[in-house]
Image (spheres, rainbow, N blue to C red):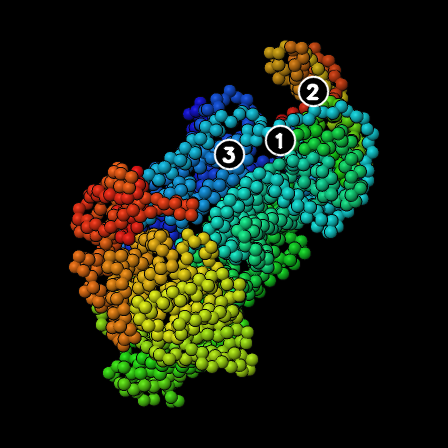
């Protein structure tokens, strides 16, 4: 019998057209993920083969996770269909064997599901074959066929995923006899996955996250976390213990579900999930004779009455939804998910921010929107179909109720559901704030964000969902159509560079919130798009009304006919009006986004970049004078979001040729009023599209001579843009810099395309990311620009009267004129040609360190951490001046700017600092990393490392700016917070470095040749410099740095390079440590240190002999991460740890810590310590780069 | 007020001709529709109830053009479908009240009174607070009847209304219907020929989408009176009567009783039988098949 049921099930399923649809969708998605750049599933960077084992594994697991939507559609009906079609009535009276019935149905559907999911490996295989065969990508981008690469993910991921998710859906739907419980299961699995992902940011939670993820994506990420491009392309994905355990857990969950369904299922009328509801069929009451007397109530059909009916019907639907257990379950699951977001609010390096309203809304919003989309998708189907499902439609359809009453009641019901969800979200956030002891609720932000931005958006989507359910004659297909729509609009279109919001219903440009600037100018575009989509929504509502399914007709012909007859005159008028409104607002938006402003999608931008290079690269090497002095007058009009700048550069001819024309590059958004040199110069070439101008001089500048170049330029904001809305000019919080908006002399290489594949695509020759470290020609420029070295700087800035405008330099004069505030800034020494202007309504706090004026300009309400900032300013100045060189200025300012970007940037004596990286950090827990202190120290260090010593524009330049600043900040931080905090900090740096290697698009470089690679100059920089300090001592390292500053500070071209630094360092290292230069700076050196065995015996009450066995390997890696083992001859820390109780908390106590020379792989150490040891380890603090950093210590 | 059906045709997308140029005039009073399963009865009733469109033809009720003015017909319609469901988690009184609202009974106290009256009439008053999900088949059917009577309909369509009712309930329902049916149009479909005969002033027989006969039951039966002959025969002798026009045969104490249609006594052993509507029904169907 089992066999018959099994075969019938398979045949039944295979006959359904949906089967092939599922197969096709999976197949097409993975096919194009492999065979095109338009579809991306998981990361795919330049160095990776298109179909390496990891890529296949990753695509398989992501698609398998996506596939649970399909799984629930496949695995819910096997038993449920007997109830939907009422076949149970006779079927359950048959002598069926429960096991055969359940097993046959389950296995049949499971096999069928495997058929559907076989589309994944087959699609990948086909994609690889076609793309390779037809040369869509070069042949070397494809790995050789290896059956294991396909087979392994199928066995490790698809089989168990399909089994447990199938078992869950099968069990839930079979026992409850309602498909919605399957969806609930879906949501719960998703919650676990998202929860797991959110745990990944805390390094210590990786194991638990790997176990919790039901789909196997996190364990896969975990096991390949530190892979290099070489590993990605050559290794097969290993399945480690946590991966296996994960698979075991979830397979077990699946089997348990199957056991449950076997024992709980009964061949009976009742669902077996809810035992408590006893159905008692009422018996007939005895007959009572009554004479017929029909009352004659007044009947009235007014519009008001109809409206009331619509509202009461909508309310009825809404309360029915609220009563459904599945709805409560989904919302509850969503709240659980958000709880994990809330406890990690704004997490950066393990430190949270205060739960301010916008931060909470942001960290919960993403996940909750997923929940809302699920609810919209599902309940649109429920609302539209519920009368049919209950078969009450045969009573309600003939009622004298107009279509619009029914259709609008569904729309109203949906509106109530959405409002309810957003109110739940708001209450949840408010409660979270209360529980975290944070009482500055921002109610108006809650209202604006949730009910005027999010609610319309969800409401529009829900209208679409209702329309789909109204059109499509099957609820499940309707759900699927919506999922496809989500994928197209949210994923596929952006990937295919379809970026205009005009055709991405119902999206609007983003509206980031900032405490400084509120929603700023972003709201205007949002509102216009909302009006636009609002008209579309009215159209949709009208179409829903016209197409409303009523009666028994379901053929398209008759539905079309009834639709035509529904087109009454008022409806036609409404259609016409809303269509006109839609077209008109669309036109107005288009006028703003594409005519007043330029609209470029990413593809066009790329092409423009390529064209720019093709057109003007020829001018790169022509002789141009250099800027030696800057004097600008900037008028900022923050409330109009405009500024104008009049100013002059003194240009000096440092070349050996006479120069007769000046080339000027400038942002093409700038309006050029004039470019002049003297009164008789002439613009002989102007290209407004690329912002390239050539100015002919009345007479050539001879070598050594200077001319004054004056400019008058303006930036005028017009209307609104589709995307890339300028964030630098804001109502409150303008922050503009010279590189972005001001004229630059000569061809600027920084707007060239850098990605090697992109360059190839546009026929550009390959380009080195940075010139060779020894390139003397390139070293004539700093890496900040080619048109200046050190300049005199002077600026006058004006702004509206309620704001403060700032520029680098000392304020020498302030005045008010015509209701505007003017400030005149001047630098007393030469600076890099790197300056900026800021304007906002600031609070100001001042302090002093020695004779240096410290100033902090911040947003009112952001007082939380300004004391920490002042402390960091003072400690940094004090450490750097006593160890490196004097501070070159008499002033140091930190200036807050809106959180549209999250960085701080060091200009001469002026540090703009984003409100997003520290002003609201919650530093109450002393165990947390104080990144506010660290970022401040890092930026101040740049006053030395960049503003005194700056590398030439060659490889390794950022070693001297970024890595040395990291080191400086680490030292300042260590003095304040101790070594433990450093260990914690460096753990994040190690993680970041090792992860960065995988996504390297070109070549990983040793740090001395670093090509502005962040994972190297920041993360590895910290590790390398900290280790160097550990080996040679802080004092001697600082002496080297101080010497190096003396030699190179404020030097004229050519600028220094990393080789000069290493030459400075080498003599200060004892011979025994000279190898460090090679290991740390000149090569990529990776260790594998492992503590193998740890034991001890007690010799006396204060003497314990520890035996520690270790294993060490040392590797050199090439630019792709291919490793070669090299002999050991290194000094490595050996540490023994005990414990101590401090403030009632257990702490690790160092009993022994000494560097040992290690020259063979396996070593045994016998060490006598004074207290009872608990653990021992080799390189226990991870000072060396080690890809498995958590096996360096071992306890008993 | 009468219901006028003219030349109504309907072919389903699978090719089945459900209505084939149906024309009927249905006056005030009870009107019975007789016909085998799949004859087109339900299609006809659903079309009158504006649940379905026709391919051609027209239906008018008074001056309402039913096919083109669905909203108007709905205002005067009471409809009891053959199959229907109810919200399981709502009680009878609440749902009936809600439906009354939708039927346009605006005044709350009038509505309450109407609901109470109908619940009493259908003997559901004692169960009015019970969830509809707990109702038995018969109670559900009675609820269906109650909702069809809401708001003084001028046209009532009931499709197999007494299915699932016990004999007592059936009688009560018949009484109720015939009282209402005195002044308005009531269309009733049934398999139970006796019901039609005893209740309906007029009737029609439908088969394969066509009206085979219509008129008042007495008149139409009168046409064949005196032409029906009855004989009791052995079970295996049925094939011997192929030459006769056997319109029905049924078991009778282990033997078979046959009815034969003939103008004169067809042969030995036959005796005259008073013609019934049932005889007419079988004869009409049989004639059509030939």
Q: Quadrant of the C terminus of chain B?
A: top right
Closer to the observer: label 2 or label 3? 3
In this rendering, is residue A712 above or below A1136? below
Residue count near mark 1 (Cα–Cα under 10 Å), binned few <14, some 14–19, many ≥20: few
Q: What is the crowding at mark 2: few (fewer than 14 residues within 10 Å), some, or many (at least 20)? A: many
Q: Quadrant of residue B88?
A: top right
Q: Which residue is mark 1?
A: B38
Quick check: A87 left or right of B22?
left
Camera-side residue: A45 or A1151? A1151
Residue under disc 3 on the same chain as residue under disc 1: no
Estimate how packed mark 3 is, as few (under 14), some (14 to 19) or many (20 or more) residues with alpha carbons within 10 Å. many
Residue labelled with disc 3? A172
Q: Residue at x 79, y 44 (%)?
A: B107
> In the rendered structure, are the residues bearing label 2 and label 3 in contact, judged by CB atoms less than 8 Å apart?
no
**Is tag 2's residue or tag 1's residue first in the polypeptide sequence?**
1
Q: Nearer the viewer, mark 3 or mark 1?
A: 3
Which chain is home to disc 1?
Answer: B
Subunit ID for the residue under disc 3 = A
According to the image, label 2 marks what residue? B261
Q: Which secondary structure lies at badge 1?
A: loop
The image quadrant that residue B222 belongs to is top right
Q: Is residue A486 visible?
A: no
Relative to A127, does residue B156 appear above or below in the rendering? above
Looking at the picture, does residue A783 appear above or below residue B63? below
Q: Chain of mark 2?
A: B
């Amino acid at each position: 019998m089992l066999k018959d049921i099994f075969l019938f099930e398979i045949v039944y399923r295979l006959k359904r057209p949906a089967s092939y649809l599922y197969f096709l969708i999976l197949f097409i998605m993975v096919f194009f993920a492999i065979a095109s750049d338009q579809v991306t599933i998981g990361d795919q960077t330049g160095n990776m083969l298109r179909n390496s084992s990891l890529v296949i594994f990753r695509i398989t697991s992501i698609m398998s996770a996506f596939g649970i939507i399909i799984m629930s559609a496949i695995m819910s009906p096997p038993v449920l269909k007997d109830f939907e079609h009422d076949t149970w009535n006779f079927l359950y009276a048959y002598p069926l064997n429960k096991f055969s019935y359940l097993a046959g149905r389950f296995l049949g559907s499971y096999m069928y599901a495997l058929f559907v999911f076989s589309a994944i490996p087959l699609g990948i295989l086909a994609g690889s074959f076609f793309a390779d065969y037809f040369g869509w990508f070069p042949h070397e981008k494809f790995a050789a066929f290896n059956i294991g690469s396909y087979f392994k993910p199928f066995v490790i991921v698809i089989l168990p995923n399909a089994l447990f998710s199938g078992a869950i859906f099968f069990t839930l739907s079979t026992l409850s006899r309602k498909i919605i419980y399957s969806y609930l299961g879906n949501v719960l699995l998703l919650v676990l996955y998202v929860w797991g992902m959110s745990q990944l940011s805390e390094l210590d939670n990786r194991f638990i996250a790997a176990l919790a993820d039901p789909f196997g994506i996190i364990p896969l990420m975990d096991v390949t976390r530190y892979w290099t491009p070489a590993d990605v392309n050559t290794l097969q994905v290993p399945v480690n213990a946590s991966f296996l355990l994960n698979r075991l857990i979830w397979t077990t969950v699946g089997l348990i579900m199957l056991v449950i369904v076997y024992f709980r299922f009964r061949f009976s009328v009742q669902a077996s999930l809810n035992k408590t509801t006893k159905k008692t069929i009422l018996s007939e009451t005895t007959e009572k004779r009554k004479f017929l007397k029909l009352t004659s109530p007044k009947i009235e059909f007014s519009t008001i009455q109809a409206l009331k009916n619509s509202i009461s019907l909508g309310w009825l639907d809404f309360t029915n939804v609220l009563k459904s257990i599945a709805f409560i379950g989904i919302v509850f699951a969503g709240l659980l998910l958000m709880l994990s977001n809330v406890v990690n609010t704004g997490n950066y390096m393990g430190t949270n921010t205060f739960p301010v309203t916008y931060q909470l809304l942001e960290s919960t919003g993403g996940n909750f929107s997923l929940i809302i989309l699920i609810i919209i998708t599902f309940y649109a189907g429920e609302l539209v179909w519920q009368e049919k499902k209950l078969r009450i439609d045969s009573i309600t359809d003939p009622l004298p109720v107009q279509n619009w009453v029914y259709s609008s009641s569904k729309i109203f019901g949906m509106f109530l559901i959405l409002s309810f969800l957003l109110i739940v979200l708001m209450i949840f956030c408010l409660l979270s704030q209360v529980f975290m002891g944070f009482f500055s609720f921002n109610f108006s932000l809650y209202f604006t964000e949730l009910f005027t931005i999010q609610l319309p958006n969800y409401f529009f989507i829900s209208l679409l969902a209702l329309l789909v359910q109204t059109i499509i004659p099957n609820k499940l297909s309707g759900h699927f159509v919506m999922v496809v729509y989500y994928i197209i609009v949210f994923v596929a279109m952006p990937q295919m560079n379809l970026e205009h919001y005009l055709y991405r219903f119902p999206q609007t440009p983003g509206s980031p919130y900032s405490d400084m600037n509120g929603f700023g100018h972003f709201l205007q575009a949002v509102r216009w798009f909302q009006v636009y989509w609002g008209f579309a929504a009215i159209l949709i509502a009208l179409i829903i009304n016209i197409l409303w399914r009523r009666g028994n007709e379901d053929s398209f012909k008759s539905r079309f006919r009834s639709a035509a007859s529904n087109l009454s005159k008022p409806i036609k008028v409404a259609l016409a009006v809303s269509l006109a409104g839609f077209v008109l607002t669309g036109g107005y938006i288009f006028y703003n986004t594409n005519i007043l402003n330029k609209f470029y999608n990413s593809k066009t931008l790329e092409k423009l970049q390529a064209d720019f290079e093709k057109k003007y690269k020829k001018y790169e090497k022509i002789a141009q004078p250099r800027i030696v002095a800057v004097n600008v007058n900037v008028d900022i009009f923050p409330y109009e979001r405009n500024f104008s700048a009049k100013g002059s550069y003194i240009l000096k001819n440092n070349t050996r040729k006479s120069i007769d024309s000046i080339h000027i590059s400038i942002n093409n958004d700038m309006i050029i009023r004039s470019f002049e040199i003297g009164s008789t110069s002439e613009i002989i070439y102007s290209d407004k599209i690329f912002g390239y101008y050539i100015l002919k001089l009345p007479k050539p500048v001879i070598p050594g001579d200077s001319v004054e170049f004056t400019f008058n330029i303006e930036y005028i904001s017009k209307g609104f843009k589709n995307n890339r809305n300028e964030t630098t000019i804001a109502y409150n919080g303008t922050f503009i810099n010279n590189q972005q908006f001001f004229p630059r002399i000569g061809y600027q290489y920084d707007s060239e395309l850098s990605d090697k594949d992109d360059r190839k695509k546009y026929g550009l020759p390959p380009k080195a990311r940075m010139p060779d470290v020894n390139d003397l020609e390139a070293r004539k420029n700093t890496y900040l620009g080619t048109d200046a070295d050190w300049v005199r700087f002077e600026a006058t800035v004006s702004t509206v009267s309620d704001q403060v405008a700032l520029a680098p330099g000392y304020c020498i004069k302030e005045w008010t004129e015509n209701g505007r505030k003017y400030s005149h800034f001047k630098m007393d020494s030469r600076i890099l040609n790197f300056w900026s202007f800021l304007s906002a309504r600031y609070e100001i706090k001042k302090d002093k360190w020695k004779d240096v004026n410290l100033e902090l300009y911040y947003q009112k309400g952001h007082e939380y951490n300004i004391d920490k900032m002042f402390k960091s300013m003072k400690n940094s100045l004090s450490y750097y001046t006593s160890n490196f060189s004097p501070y070159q200025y008499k002033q140091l300012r930190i200036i807050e700017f809106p959180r549209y970007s999250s960085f701080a940037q060091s200009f001469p004596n002026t540090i703009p600092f984003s409100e997003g990286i520290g002003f609201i950090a919650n530093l109450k827990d002393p165990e947390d990393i104080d990144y506010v202190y660290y970022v401040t120290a890092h930026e101040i260090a740049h006053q030395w490392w960049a503003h005194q010593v700056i590398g030439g524009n060659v490889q390794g330049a950022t070693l001297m700016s970024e890595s040395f600043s990291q080191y400086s900040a680490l030292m300042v931080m260590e003095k304040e917070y101790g070594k433990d905090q450093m260990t914690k900090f460096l753990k994040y740096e190690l993680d970041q470095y090792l992860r960065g290697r995988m996504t390297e698009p070109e070549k990983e470089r040793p740090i001395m040749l670093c090509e502005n690679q962040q994972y190297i100059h920041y993360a590895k920089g910290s590790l390398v410099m900290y280790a160097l300090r550990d080996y040679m001592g802080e004092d001697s390292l600082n002496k080297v740095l101080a010497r190096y500053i003396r030699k190179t500070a404020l030097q004229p071209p050519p600028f220094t390079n990393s080789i000069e630094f290493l030459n400075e360092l080498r003599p200060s290292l004892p011979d025994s440590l000279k190898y460090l230069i090679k290991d740390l700076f000149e090569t990529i050196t990776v260790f594998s240190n492992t503590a193998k065995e740890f034991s001890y015996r007690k010799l006396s009450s204060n003497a314990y002999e520890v035996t520690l066995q270790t294993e060490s390997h040392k590797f050199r890696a090439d630019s792709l991460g291919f490793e070669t083992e090299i002999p050991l001859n290194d000094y490595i820390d050996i540490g023994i740890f005990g414990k101590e109780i401090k403030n009632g908390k257990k702490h690790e106590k160092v009993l022994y810590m000494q560097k040992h020379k290690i020259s063979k792989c396996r070593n045994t150490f016998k060490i006598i310590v004074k207290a009872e040891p608990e653990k021992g380890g080799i390189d226990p603090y991870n000072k060396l780069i080690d890809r498995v950093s958590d096996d360096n210590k071992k306890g008993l | 007020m009468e219901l006028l059906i003219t030349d109504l045709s309907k072919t389903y997308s699978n090719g089945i001709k459900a209505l084939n140029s149906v024309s009927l005039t249905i006056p005030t009073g009870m009107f019975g529709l007789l016909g085998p399963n799949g004859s087109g009865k339900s299609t006809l009733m659903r079309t009158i109830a504006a649940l379905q469109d026709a391919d051609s033809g027209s239906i008018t009720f008074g001056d309402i053009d039913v096919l083109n003015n669905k909203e108007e017909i709905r205002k005067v319609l009471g409809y009891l479908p053959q199959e229907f469901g109810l919200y399981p988690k709502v009680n009878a009184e609440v749902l009936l009240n809600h439906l009354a609202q939708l039927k346009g009974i605006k005044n709350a106290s009038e509505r309450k009174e109407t609901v109470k009256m109908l619940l009493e009439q259908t003997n559901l008053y004692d169960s009015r607070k019970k969830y509809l999900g707990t109702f038995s088949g018969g109670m559900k059917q009675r609820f269906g009847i109650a909702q069809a009577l809401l708001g003084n309909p001028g046209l009532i369509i009931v499709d197999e209304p007494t299915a699932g009712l016990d004999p007592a309930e059936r009688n009560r329902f018949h009484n109720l219907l015939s009282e209402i049916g005195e002044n308005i149009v009531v269309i009733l479909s049934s398999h139970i020929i006796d019901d039609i005969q005893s209740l309906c002033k007029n009737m029609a027989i439908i088969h394969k989408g066509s009206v085979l006969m219509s008129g008042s039951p007495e008149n139409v039966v009168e046409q064949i009176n005196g032409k029906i002959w009855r004989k009791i025969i052995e079970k295996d002798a049925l094939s011997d009567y192929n030459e006769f026009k056997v319109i029905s045969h049924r078991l009778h104490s282990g033997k078979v009783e046959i009815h034969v249609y003939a103008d004169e006594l067809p042969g030995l052993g036959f005796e005259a039988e008073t013609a019934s509507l049932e005889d007419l029904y079988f004869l009409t169907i049989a004639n059509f098949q030939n």
